[in-house]
């Protein structure tokens, strides 16, 4: 984790498949089912998270150490139909203990589709998973 320093950058490209359109986000939603067939905001958020994870994996004791998203502040300014390639660019701008802050941007080759910030926290995977599982356990 000592290698995590502001300035770390990563770029990831992803071709949007039909399985990442709005109707696929919650297939049980009749409202989503009739929306335009474009890249869903929820999947865009996930793609940006994925790009941030890829950026930091070489700096962590992976998979013992991982990161989880803690805050998302993103625009979704343009529609992207399936078949286009989205390019995500992330830059680590802050490291405070286990908290990481990224500036992020994504485009589809035609438009800037997203800009903003994303925060993640470095976790000990076993400890984190244990705490999460205990939420559903009887006292």
Image (cartoon, grey):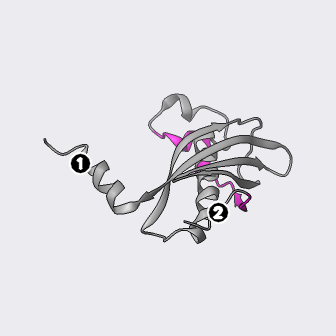
Q: Which residues are magenta?
A: 7-27
- Toward the viewer: 7 or 110? 7
Where residue 58 appears, as percent x and y from the top left, is 59, 71
Residue 84, quarter of the rendered image = bottom right
Q: Residue 121 vs residue 21: left or right? A: left
Taking the magenta stretch, the answer to whether it contains residue 134 is no
Residue 111 visible in rendering: yes
Taking the magenta stretch, the answer to whether it contains residue 14 is yes
Looking at the rendered structure, the secondary structure element under dot 2 is: helix
Relative to 91, is 115 above or below?
A: above
Where residue 105 appears, as percent x and y from the top left, is 75, 47
Disc ID at residue 55: 2
Residue at image mark 1: 134
Residue furthest right as drawn: 110
Q: Earlier in the sequence, mark 2 or mark 1?
A: 2
Q: Residues within 10 Å of mark 2 (few under 14, many from 20)?
A: many
Q: Residue at x 49, y 71 (%)?
A: 61
Looking at the rendered structure, the secondary structure element under dot 1 is: helix
- Toward the viewer: 137 or 123? 123
Q: Residues within 10 Å of mark 1 (few under 14, many from 20)?
A: few
Q: Residue 74 vs residue 105: left or right? A: left
Q: Residue at x 71, y 36 (%)?
A: 76
Disc 2 to disc 1, how far (Cα)? 30 Å
Residue 83 visible in rendering: no
Q: Residue at x 72, y 48 (%)?
A: 104
Disc ID at residue 29: none
Residue 73, quarter of the rendered image = top right
Relative to 87, is 105 above or below?
A: above
Q: Residue at x 59, y 39 (%)?
A: 72
Where residue 137 appears, as percent x and y from the top left, is 18, 45
């Amino acid at each position: 984790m000592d290698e995590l320093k502001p300035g770390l950058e990563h770029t990831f490209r992803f071709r949007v498949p039909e399985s990442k359109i709005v109707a696929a986000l919650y297939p049980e939603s009749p409202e989503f089912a009739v929306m335009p067939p474009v890249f869903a905001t929820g999947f865009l958020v996930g793609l940006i998270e994925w790009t941030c994870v890829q950026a930091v994996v070489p700096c962590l004791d992976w998979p013992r150490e991982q990161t989880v998203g803690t805050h998302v502040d993103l625009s979704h300014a343009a529609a992207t139909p399936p078949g286009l390639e989205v390019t995500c660019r992330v830059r680590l701008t802050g490291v405070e203990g286990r908290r990481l802050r990224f500036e992020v941007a994504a485009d589809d080759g035609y438009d800037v589709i997203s800009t903003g910030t994303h925060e993640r926290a470095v976790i000990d995977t076993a400890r984190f998973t244990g705490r999460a599982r205990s939420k559903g356990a009887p006292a």
